[in-house]
Image (cartoon, grey):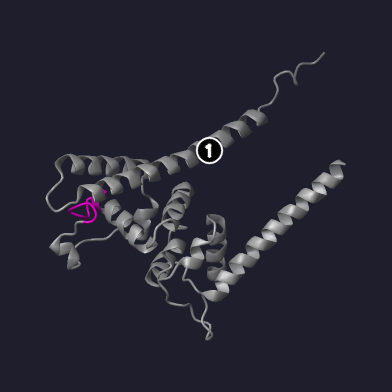
């Protein structure tokens, strides 16, 4: 009976893996032109149907087939409108990347939301004069230093989320004339939700690790001889 149960479980996992792979293959084929080049498209509808794990598989498939240069993946994907794929390796924190990916999937324009996040990361890093959506004239003319891929990868996630939430809370209190209260409140709520979802993933991982550590602890009675 145990053997049959195990076999059913294995068959189920194989079917799930097969369906997922087929799904990724289909999206991959839709991203390639007839001449074999990568499509330049701002429509990420197909990518929104993928889970984070499937998107990672798709990105790996693009890399393996030579469509992405390993030293410039994020910029390449971002430039052709595949912003959902560009956040797979956005930071060195996979939990945050997944949280950001899942949040972007809910947005009508994922790329615009990513622009906002990048802008605010640069603001908190001292490279922007104002938080999103305000852009100084100098910045609009390109006279500022954007973050490098390496800076994004080494981002202190917790510090950024804490700081940006405090920033929008202060904006709501003062509310400059050029800002809309409802839109500012919505932005604040979005970052609070992002922080909440990220923390849940962190807590879940911590609980799993603690459980593994607990189960792997050697029983002190084992070494006691009769």
Q: Position of residue 95 (x, y in %)?
A: 48, 47
Seen in the picture, residue 38 relative to 172 is either above or below; the reply is below
Nearer to me, 37 or 1: 1
Seen in the picture, residue 178 relative to 193 is either above or below; the reply is below
Task: Please name the residue shown 29% across and 42% down the image.
Answer: 165
Furthest residue toward left = 177
- Image: magenta residue range: 123-133
Q: Position of residue 53 (x, y in %)?
A: 56, 56
Majority secondary structure in the magenta region:
loop
Task: Please name the residue shown 61% across and 65% down the image.
Answer: 23
Q: Position of residue 181 (x, y in %)?
A: 21, 47
Q: Which residue is mark 1?
A: 204
140 vs 225, left or right, is: left
Say whether residue 73 is visible: yes
Task: Please name the residue shown 30% across and 56% down the image.
Answer: 116
Locate residue 185: give its quadrant. Answer: top left
State the SS at label 1: helix
Furthest residue toward bottom = 35
Furthest residue toward top = 226
Say whether residue 66 is visible: no
Q: Is residue 34 magenta?
A: no
Q: Residues within 10 Å of mark 1 (few under 14, many from 20)?
A: few
27 vs 107, left or right, is: right
Task: Please name the residue shown 24% across and 52% down the image.
Answer: 123
Seen in the picture, residue 1 relative to 37 is either above or below; the reply is above
**Which of the image's four quarters has the N terminus?**
top right
């Amino acid at each position: 009976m145990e053997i049959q149960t195990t076999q059913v479980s294995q068959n189920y996992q194989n079917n799930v893996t097969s369906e997922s792979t087929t799904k990724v293959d289909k999206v991959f084929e839709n991203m390639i032109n007839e001449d074999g080049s990568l499509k330049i498209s701002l429509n990420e509808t197909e990518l929104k149907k993928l889970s984070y794990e499937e998107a990672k598989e798709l990105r790996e498939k693009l890399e393996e087939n030579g469509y992405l240069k390993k030293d410039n993946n994020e910029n390449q994907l971002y430039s052709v409108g595949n912003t959902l794929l560009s956040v797979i390796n956005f930071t060195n924190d996979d939990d945050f990347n997944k949280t950001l990916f899942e949040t972007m999937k809910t947005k009508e324009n994922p790329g615009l939301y990513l622009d906002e996040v990048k802008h605010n990361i640069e603001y908190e890093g001292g490279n922007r004069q104002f938080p999103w959506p305000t852009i100084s004239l100098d910045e609009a003319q390109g006279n500022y230093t954007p973050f490098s891929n390496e800076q994004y990868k080494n981002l202190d996630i917790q510090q950024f989320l804490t700081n940006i939430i405090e920033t929008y809370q202060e904006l709501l209190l003062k509310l400059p004339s050029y800002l809309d209260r409802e839109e500012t409140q919505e932005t604040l709520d979005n970052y609070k939700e992002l922080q909440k979802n990220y923390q849940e993933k962190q807590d879940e991982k911590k609980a799993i690790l603690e459980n593994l550590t607990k189960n792997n602890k050697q029983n002190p009675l084992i070494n006691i001889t009769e």
